Amino acid sequence: MKYILQDLKVNINNNIYLKDPESSTLGKKIIEFSILLIDEIGFDSFTFKKLGEKIGSNESSIYRYFENKHKLLLYLTSWYWGWLEYQLVFTTNSISDSKEKLNKAIEIITRATKEDSSFSHINEVLLNKIVINEYSKSYLTKEVDNENKEGYFSIYKRLVNRIKDMITEVDSDYKYPTSLASTVTEGSLHQHFLKDHFSSLTDCDEKITPTTYFINLVFNSLNNQKND
Amino acid sequence: MKYILQDLKVNINNNIYLKDPESSTLGKKIIEFSILLIDEIGFDSFTFKKLGEKIGSNESSIYRYFENKHKLLLYLTSWYWGWLEYQLVFTTNSISDSKEKLNKAIEIITRATKEDSSFSHINEVLLNKIVINEYSKSYLTKEVDNENKEGYFSIYKRLVNRIKDMITEVDSDYKYPTSLASTVTEGSLHQHFLKDHFSSLTDCDEKITPTTYFINLVFNSLNNQKND
DNA sequence: CATATATTGATAGTAATACTATTAATTTTG
DNA sequence: CAAAATTAATAGTATTACTATCAATATATG
């Protein structure tokens, strides 16, 4: 719970936006409807002009909040990871048994978001789908090193690091806790994607969830005599 | 070796291109220099106009080979996966011990390409880098289901399936061989990317390679009494 | 409550992208 | 060497990804 309280409102690096979208009605509308529109037509076809038409607002007004759609994607995905981190910390905080704690953590980061909190303007179910379909595009760029230096990915990194810490708590001898944490986080998005589009490349379906698979994967690696 | 011989020339689905780039000098130049240019400026900034300038050829001539740059990316990545598959099959074919075979297979798909074969127009080292940085973009699209139906990803799927078969050979009781195979294949690209851009999210570096990590991960999961 | 200030909207404009079409020049092949 | 195929050159369109300017409207403060 150390650095989480200050982030209750999901504290997003303020260089990602030009004007805080949480600070106005228009800003919130931009966030709310960009999620709906990106889900509908995909990030590649998404433009500020189309978003403006959707919310009955001017393209130029949207440009006052975000430099470009890439920055908006960074905003949305940062919000998502911050929201997931909040759930992770809140839910696992009270668990003292390290295995049980890690188990719960994997459950939270690998499950599909099923219900929208409905009292904010953010639809978490659709946002989860956007993260599955588009998150990679936010870092697979030529600008990634500069943007990383600017701190645009710090929430995601902090989240992966929390999982790494929980892995180490379970087995301090395990040699690849960071890679395992990043494999689960990114691999979970990938397995969800495969389930929806390449069913021949995954065992996950209605019965077997990515959660089942990753819990098995992680605990097979920890406290294992083969593990040298 | 069943279906590999017909693919010696890397048999790419002929709906990916309008005219086979292997059939002419210009076609080969398009492939050769698109690899150099995408590596240099990234796929997002890459255009047929820039490529035309680079090879002293007209934009419209390139459009006679590929409908658009997305199709060119599908071509390049298919070629890469076909080339890797060839190495995989060729190298593991003679190994009778199933564990040793799987071990070698993981080595082949997770290692960084270090040398260019140099007698073709394709620079495999740069192509490997392109696959790491851009492959996800070829399927994270709204058209993925149609393109999958058209068979544009069949080489990749066949490769993952070969690894799945090898996993099952080692442990027929393991429940998630397909997910494990796709996790290794895609996770390897991801760990290479992290190593280059997010070193805090991976244990991989000069000493620990993705190969080391994934061999440990896979064999910890197989023939393991925890594996219920 | 009046006025200064900030925010948003409307319109216009630019350079680049992602193509298509046409015709001319060049190369290949039969 | 002539016919066919390929490539190059040029032009043109619609869309994208912005920037600039100014008017309209909302909001804040004194």
Image (cartoon, coloured by chain):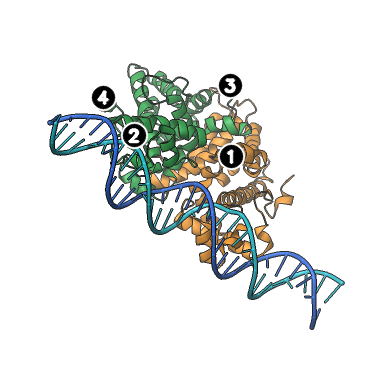
Chain colours: A orange, B green, C blue, D cyan
Say whether disc 3 or disc 2 marks the residue closer to the N-terminus.
2
Q: Is residue A187 above or below residue D18?
A: above
Q: Which mark is residue A143?
A: 1
The reply to the same-chain question for discs 4 and 1 is no
Q: Is residue A197 above or below residue B77?
A: below
Looking at the rendered structure, which numbered label has been put on residue B155? 2
Dot 4 and dot 1 residues touching (CB under 8 Å):
no
| Residue type, label 2 | Ile
Q: Amino acid at mark 1?
A: Glu
Q: Amino acid at mark 3?
A: Glu
- The residue indicated by pointer 4 is B5
Of badges 2 and 1, the one in the foreground is 1
Q: Position of residue B112 (x, y in %)?
A: 48, 24
Q: Residues within 10 Å of mark 1 (few under 14, many from 20)?
A: few
> Going 54% across and 35% down the picture, which residue do you hit?
A183
The answer to whether residue A115 is seen in the rendering is: no
Q: CA distance from mark 3 to mark 4?
A: 36 Å
Mark 4 to mark 2 CA distance (whole Å): 14 Å
Discs 3 and 1 share one subunit:
no
